[in-house]
């Protein structure tokens, strides 16, 4: 399965609670933090929801 790297690039201050929970579920806490996940439909949907707060790299 392919992997993607997700990096938090913007703050979640003044964002809806659902977006904050999505970032937490992805494992992102601090700006600049990077996590690696499998390229599944669930993860891609979560990334799409917060795409304005993160950057994504494919391996």
Image (tube, rainbow, N blue to C red):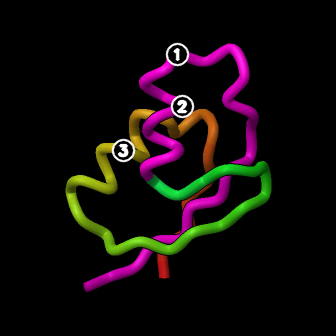
Give SS at disc 3: helix
How many numbered circles does the render carry?
3
In front of the other: 30 or 54: 30
Q: Nearer the viewer, mark 3 or mark 2?
A: 2
Is residue 19 rendered magenta in the image? yes
Q: Is residue 2 above or below residue 4?
A: below
Circle 2 residues within 10 Å: few <14, some 14–19, many ≥20: some
| Residue at point 40%, 40% (across, down) | 48
Q: Evaluate if marks 2 and 1 touch, with contact meaning CB atoms under 8 Å apart.
A: yes
Q: Which mark is residue 46?
A: 3
Q: Is residue 42 left or right of residue 20?
A: left
The residue singled out by tag 2 in the image is 20
* Mark 3 → mark 1, Cα distance in angstroms: 14 Å
x and y percentages locating residue 9 in the rendered image: 74, 47
Circle 1 residues within 10 Å: few <14, some 14–19, many ≥20: few
Magenta span: 1-25
The residue singled out by tag 1 in the image is 16
N-terminal of the pair, mark 3 or mark 2, is 2
| Residue at point 48%, 28% (across, down) | 19
């Amino acid at each position: 399965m392919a992997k993607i790297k997700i990096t938090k690039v913007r703050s979640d201050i003044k964002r809806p609670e659902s977006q904050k929970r999505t970032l937490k579920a992805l494992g992102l806490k601090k700006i600049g933090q990077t996590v690696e996940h499998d390229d599944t439909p669930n993860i891609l949907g979560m990334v799409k929801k917060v795409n304005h707060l993160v950057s994504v790299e494919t391996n």
